[in-house]
Amino acid sequence: MKSRNRISVQQTQRMALTTGLATSIRILRADAAGLSRYLEEAAAENPQIILTRPQVTDWLPRWKSAFSDAERPEQEAAGPSLVSHVLGMIEALRLTPADQRIAMALAEALEPSGWIGRSLSSIAGQLGVALPAVEAILKRLQDRAEPTGLFARNLAECLRLQAEEAGELDRPMQALLTRLDLLAKGEIDRIAREAGLEVADLRQAFGRLRSYDPKPGAGFEVSAAPVREPDLIAEKGAAGWIVSLNRSALPSVSVAEGRAKGRAEARALIKMIEGRNATLLSVAQDILTRQTAALEHGIGALVPMTMGEVAEALGLHDSTISRVVAGTAVDTPRGTWWLRSLFTKAAREGGPAAGALRDRLTKLVAEEDPDAPLSDEALALALAEGGAPVARRTVAKYRAMLNLPPAHRRRRRH
């Protein structure tokens, strides 16, 4: 029986990630600082792109004229933010003006985890200083940091700093820290062979490693954004809360006069930026309209909200919302917040937002008697009295997320 070749026609649909689409996505997900850097790179390559940089000012969180002294809400007593903690640490170092400028740039680069989110070379280039000068200030900040691990450049360095402080940076610990990829896969036997060590010694080192904190910045006020100019500003007007772009954080873009090559690309870039700004404003306005109570009363008044709900209301895809809010900060009368931190699910069906419960939990622990700290069961009862009944295991989970130790470790030692 002879085989026959068949010719069939099939129609498939596929989206190609063109250069223009990739650029549009990059612009959409960029915060003000990242977009500024991208525009500077684009202007350096295309002389038809003209950047007018905003006047350089030292950013301070703004209390807008919409709030008179009588109407200004009081700041809630809450756990310290990573920002305020780091600023106090830098002030205590009593650096020279030049060194303080470097320290502040490093503080601006901190991620919520407490790690540095930018390369030291890019920070040095931004400041116009030598790389060794930045490395020297980073070393001083790492040595001074409390908790240990702040200002680490990656997970391995974060854990290494803690191992050094504990006096536990022996050969087995070094072998684990240089092979975290293998450790994550559970391949301790392979690490032992490569390092020429006993498996028992590595397992003992692993037990110590598990006691370290991989994200030392996570225990601070979760909604507080890093020290940098925010992308957006929220103001209260007669008609309610209005969100606007922080124009001082972005350069303005225009096309050079004439008919030189590159004008079409410059116009396309401007159109992408205008689209990014319009999308950012509409998404932020919807988010903050839903979270008006948090703007009025603080993070403890957050209501449950998902990206899907915002996407459906605006006719956008969930992934678009995720890109827009990534790394985007908004200045409010209650501090500078991450937009992403305002998304929080209900702790249980029909209940309050998990983010609000975590905020209340932080305050309960901050206000407790250090000689008689509250157990997880007592914390659950206290939350229930405030109208938020939760299970003890939920309190334990939130406490772990906030890096709050259990009651016996919070007890003050005399």
Image (cartoon, helix red, strand yellow):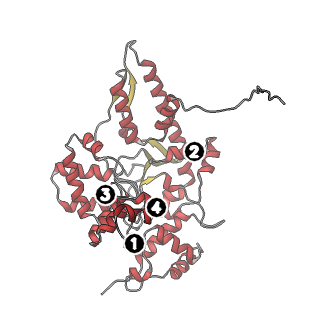
Hey, which residue is sitting farthest right in the picture? 1
In the structure shown, which secondary structural element does the residue marked by tag 4 occupy? helix
In the structure shown, which secondary structural element does the residue marked by tag 2 occupy? helix
Tag 2: residue type? Ser
- Label 1 belongs to which residue? 211
Are the two marked residues, 3 and 1, in contact with CB atoms closer than 8 angstroms?
Answer: no
- Can you say which quadrant of the picture contains the C terminus? bottom left
Q: CA distance from mark 3 to mark 4?
A: 23 Å
Question: Taking 373 as reference, is 201 above or below it?
Answer: above
- Label 4 belongs to which residue? 184
In the structure shown, which secondary structural element does the residue marked by tag 3 occupy? loop
Mark 4 Cα-neighbour bin, 10 Å: few <14, some 14–19, many ≥20: few
In the structure shown, which secondary structural element does the residue marked by tag 1 occupy? loop
Question: Which residue occupies the foreground of this view, 127 or 243?
Answer: 127
Q: Where in the figure is residue 178, as x and y percent of width and height?
A: 35, 59
Q: Residue at x 41, y 76 (%)?
A: 367
User: Which picture quadrant has residue 157?
Assistant: bottom left
Q: Residue at x 45, y 70 (%)?
A: 362
- Label 3 belongs to which residue? 151
- Label 2 belongs to which residue? 319
Tag 4: residue type? Ala
